[in-house]
Image (cartoon, rainbow, N blue to C red):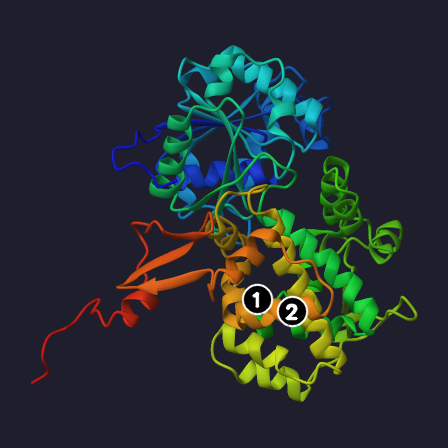
């Protein structure tokens, strides 16, 4: 949904919850020139420093300590959440008991508390009681049900309620998934799109109120499937990361480094959320907890935050650090190995994500590395196609979500085009895969790609035909313009 040219900007906002996401969102709102109220709960106990100062639990500095501490931490956080440290002056600290009435001054209230349905419901009840008429209220949930979250709220509240799922860190990650609830006013969705795109500089996709929305739904499926395939083909952690990183047009963090950054406990939570809220037995099985994750989590090896996960960094004499990788056979760590093979080298040498993936898939299918690459890509493509209409109505929203939220160079449907839609569907059928009906019908009708370029414009498959892709105001469709032979800019004739 494109932002309206005449959208109404936000001047004052409130963020409830001063943790990593809440403080990051507050910082980025301040970056955009918005005055922000940051609220959190009143602490239940004094810190040692507060006791030394002779403060009590009733002292204002203690009561708003969580929010004020989060603001102070912004100057020391890396990467920096604020464009300029002085922008912290745009953020006011408070607490949910003494300053609740100040929510009535906000044009937009963002709930960003812990991912627990009962706590979010309580906070939204407080927000409803304090908000002014017409104020927007959004939740920053990463995948909880909006329908369940706003149970008991008034119809007027529900018209102004939606999810705005920012990705961490909010200043740097482009994606914001906007998720309307059942009763959300379309004008509110349009305004939220305008705020996020025009004021905050974000890329917006519209998701449906389904478990984990778009990017985390597909990304989590891909990670779980990668774990299954690595065991199937007997690859090492390093081999899998060499194949699922830049060689596939994805970030250097690939799969296992990304899992360590996310936190293995976080991934297990997301897997559980999907599995508990889908009804299809096959899909439940797709989101089963991988045994390796459960074993690492039981050992307290949760990734970077605990110092060890699939990789471990060890300090050596002289201050040097070594990176070790998990050995699947012993479940101990060994020195990380540099991975090289003709297949990986060919993918690295290819120019562009499409060419890289074609190099991976064009190798001998008997090669474990090539077979692993094909199976992981195939699974993601089929799963993404099955989710169209369930998690999002547009393939462009799915593709953009994966590019902006996970750093993929090509979204699933763009990638499918790059490897050849007809040929890959034929191979999938030969391997006994069930092709989603809409994809099978589309190919049977003679179409060869989900996207096509024409006259500098881009079209995508929609309802069995093609619809023109809405052009974002801040983006230039360079590939389409180049194909059409159009000039974007010229400096004039050279002498």
Q: Is the Cβ of the residue at disc 2 closer than 8 Å to that at disc 1?
A: yes
| CA neighbours of label 1 inside 10 A, class few (<14), some (14 to 19), many (20+) | some
Which secondary structure lies at badge 2? helix
Image coordinates of residue 77 in percent, x first then y, are 55, 49
Residue under the point 62% across and 50% down: 386
Q: Is residue 101 above or below residue 406?
A: above
Image coordinates of residue 89 in percent, x first then y, are 41, 34
Residue under the point 70% across and 22% down: 118
Name the one closer to the observer, 184 or 141.
184
Q: Give the quadrant of residue 39.
A: top right
Name the one closer to the observer, 285 or 299.
285
Q: How many marks?
A: 2
Q: Is residue 481 visible?
A: yes
* Residue where numbered disc 1 is placed: 250
* Residue where numbered disc 2 is placed: 244
Q: What is the distance, in whole Å, between disc 2 and disc 1 at their CAs?
A: 7 Å
Which secondary structure lies at badge 1? loop
Residue under the point 21% across and 69% down: 486
Image coordinates of residue 63 in percent, x first then y, are 61, 21
Nearer-N-terminus badge (2/1): 2
Q: Is residue 33 left or right of residue 358?
A: left
Residue at the extreme left: 495
Q: Is residue 313 above or below residue 79?
A: below
Q: Is residue 115 left or right of residue 268?
A: left
């Amino acid at each position: 949904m494109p932002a309206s040219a005449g959208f109404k900007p936000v001047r004052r906002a409130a963020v409830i919850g001063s943790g990593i996401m809440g403080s990051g969102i507050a910082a980025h709102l301040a970056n955009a020139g918005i005055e922000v109220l940051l609220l959190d709960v009143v602490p239940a106990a004094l810190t040692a420093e507060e006791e030394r100062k002779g403060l009590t639990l009733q002292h204002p500095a203690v009561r708003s300590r969580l929010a004020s501490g989060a603001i102070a931490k912004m100057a020391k956080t890396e990467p920096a959440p604020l464009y300029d440290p002085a922008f912290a002056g745009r953020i006011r600290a408070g607490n949910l008991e003494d300053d609740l009435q100040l929510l009535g001054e906000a044009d937009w209230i963002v709930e960003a508390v812990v991912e627990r349905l009962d706590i979010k419901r309580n906070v939204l009840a407080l927000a409803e009681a304090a908000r002014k008429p017409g104020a927007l209220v959004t939740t920053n949930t990463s995948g909880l049900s909006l329908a369940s979250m706003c149970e008991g709220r008034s119809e007027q509240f529900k018209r102004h309620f939606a999810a705005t799922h920012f990705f961490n860190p909010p200043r740097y990650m482009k994606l914001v998934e906007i998720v309307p609830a059942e009763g959300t006013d379309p004008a509110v969705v349009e305004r939220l799109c305008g705020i996020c795109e025009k004021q905050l500089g974000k890329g917006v996709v519209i998701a449906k109120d389904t478990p984990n929305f778009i990017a985390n739904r597909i990304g989590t499926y891909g990670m779980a499937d990668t774990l299954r395939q690595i065991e199937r083909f007997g690859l090492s952690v390093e081999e899998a990361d060499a194949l699922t990183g830049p060689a596939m047009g994805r970030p250097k963090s690939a799969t296992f480094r990304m899992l360590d950054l996310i936190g293995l406990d976080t991934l297990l939570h997301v897997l559980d959320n999907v599995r508990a809220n889908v009804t299809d037995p096959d899909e439940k099985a797709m989101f089963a907890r991988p045994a390796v994750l459960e074993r690492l989590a039981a050992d307290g090896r949760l990734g970077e935050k605990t110092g060890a996960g699939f990789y471990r960094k060890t300090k050596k004499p002289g201050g040097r650090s070594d990176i070790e990788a998990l050995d699947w056979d012993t479940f101990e760590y060994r020195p990380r190995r540099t991975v090289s093979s003709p297949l990986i080298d060919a993918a690295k040498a290819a120019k562009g994500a499409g060419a890289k993936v074609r190099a991976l898939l064009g190798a001998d299918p008997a090669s474990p590395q090539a077979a692993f690459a094909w199976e992981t890509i195939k699974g993601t493509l089929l799963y993404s196609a099955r989710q169209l209409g369930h998690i999002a109505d547009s393939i462009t929203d799915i593709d953009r979500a994966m590019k902006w939220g996970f750093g993929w160079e090509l979204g699933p449907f763009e990638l499918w085009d790059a490897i050849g839609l007809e040929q890959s569907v034929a191979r999938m059928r030969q391997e006994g895969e069930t092709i989603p009906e809409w994809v099978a019908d589309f190919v049977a009708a003679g179409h060869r790609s989900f996207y096509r370029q024409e006259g500098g414009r881009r079209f995508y498959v929609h309802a069995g035909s093609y619809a023109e892709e809405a052009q974002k105001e801040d983006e230039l469709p360079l590939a389409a313009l180049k194909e059409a032979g159009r000039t974007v800019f010229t400096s004039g004739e050279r002498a």
